[in-house]
Amino acid sequence: MSDPLSTRISDKGDDLIALTQDLIRIPTLNPPGDHYATICDFLGKRLSPRFDCTLVRAKGTPGDSDRYPRWNIIARATGTRPGPCVHFNSHTDVVEVGKGWTRDPFGGELDGDRIYGRGACDMKGGLAASIIAAEAFLEQHPDFAGAIEISGTADEESGGYGGVAYLAEQGWFNPDRVQHVIIPEPLQKDRICLGHRGGWWAEIETKGEIAHGSMPFLGDCAVRHMGAVLQAFEDTLYPAMAARHTDMPVVPEGARSSTMNINAIHGGQAEFLPGDTSLPAHCVPDSCRITIDRRFLIEEPIAEVSAEVIALLDGLKSSRANFDYTITELNRVLPSMTDREAPIVTTVSQAIQDVLGQEATYVASPGSYDQKHIDRIGKLKNCIAYGPGVLELAHKPDEWIGVTDMLDSARVMGRTLESLLLP
């Protein structure tokens, strides 16, 4: 890396801290989709001196409404001569706060080398690092070729359909206008994430018959039927998934096998609202529902993933008295994997070697992120995730990002821009 650009990025350390804190202090909670317009306005004011900024609302996408509009921002700086476009894409939404915090989740507190807050790691620190890298590059190399884009997009935490998916459908990630994409998700500064596992989400409902709770033999308890489903998962499905392994470099190690999470379960009467002191009525539940989150490997066809669950349910229907069910697919995401010899992979790998003095490690993500839309909808294969932060901190209480890691990642990003956009 050129010494002047490295020095320029280092000199922006205080700016990087302040920018990260400012982004954390905008509580872009999803759901429901709070403050998307606020953070896009903030980014527009920050970037507009050097970038042409466009705001795009993803009208009609899941969750979009006049109260919670799905706003996205795309900023573009064009060079003095033709060349490729390097695009840094970061999602601006964060998940719910949850319990267990000892810091203000939207305070952006700096303690030593760490900045704390919801979204610090996932992924406002990565967004801030990409902005600092791009601004320093533009200051150091105004006579560059091609273009640099920075986007802040909505709804990644709920599938990305109001963000990158919509933008890809509208042509923003067409390979004719964008050639290289880096998503600064928190995979650690020395690791290149090539892709992610697939996901299949479904709701299963078991049926019963309502009756008086003192005479359950006159009804049919849907919750007990769901208990049989859960037991069948324990006895059959979970062992089968644990026995499967992928050649994808998925981290952590446990995600090298297929997995399934029970996201939610509900049976019987609706839960009371907070403050309602009513006692429950005495009824046998005639319905029970669970939501499953099945993560599958690139070696598993999606048709087999869903068929395996349906076969288990059909087996219960034939062996268990009065068992009946419905299953509704909620969403599906196919695995994505970028070739290790793709230009963005080899360029960032060399930048890690140049800046950090070590070889890059190649990984894949246990959960999906917006690469799926850039790949499947945008048809742009030259895409990776690379950014600062520890993946295991995402969605946890007292989430934090390291300042040193952000600066090192920004240097890697700057070196990547030099390799791709300088003559």
Image (cartoon, rainbow, N blue to C red):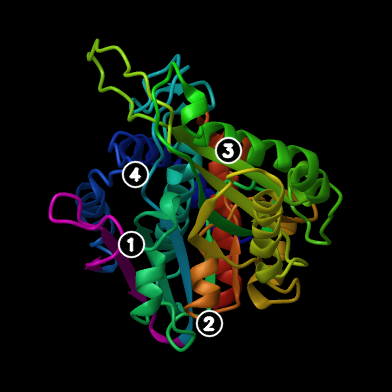
* Along the line of sight, the residue nearer the viewer: 237 or 366: 237
Q: Which residue is drawn at 71% across and 53% down?
A: 315
Q: Distance between the residues labelled 1 and 2?
A: 18 Å
Which of the two marks, 4 or 3, is nearer to us in this view?
A: 3
**What residue type is disc 2 on?**
Lys
Residue 56 drawn in magenta: yes
Q: How far apart are marks 2 and 3 (CA)?
A: 41 Å
Q: Rate crowding at label 1 as few (under 14), some (14 to 19) or many (20 or more) other CA atoms within 10 Å.
A: many
Q: Which mark is residue 30?
A: 4
Q: Name the residue under label 2.
A: 379
Q: Mark 1 points at which residue?
A: 162
Query: With 68 as the anchor, is 387 left or right in this view?
Result: right
Vertical relation: 335 (above or below) 115? below
Q: Give the range drawn in magenta.
A: 54-82
* Quarter of the image where the C terminus is located: bottom right
Toward the right, the furthest residue is: 243
Q: Name the residue under label 3.
A: 226
Where does the image place residue 416, in percent across and percent down from the top left? Answer: 59, 66
Q: Rate crowding at label 4 as few (under 14), some (14 to 19) or many (20 or more) other CA atoms within 10 Å.
A: many
Which of the two marks, 3 or 1, is nearer to us in this view?
A: 3
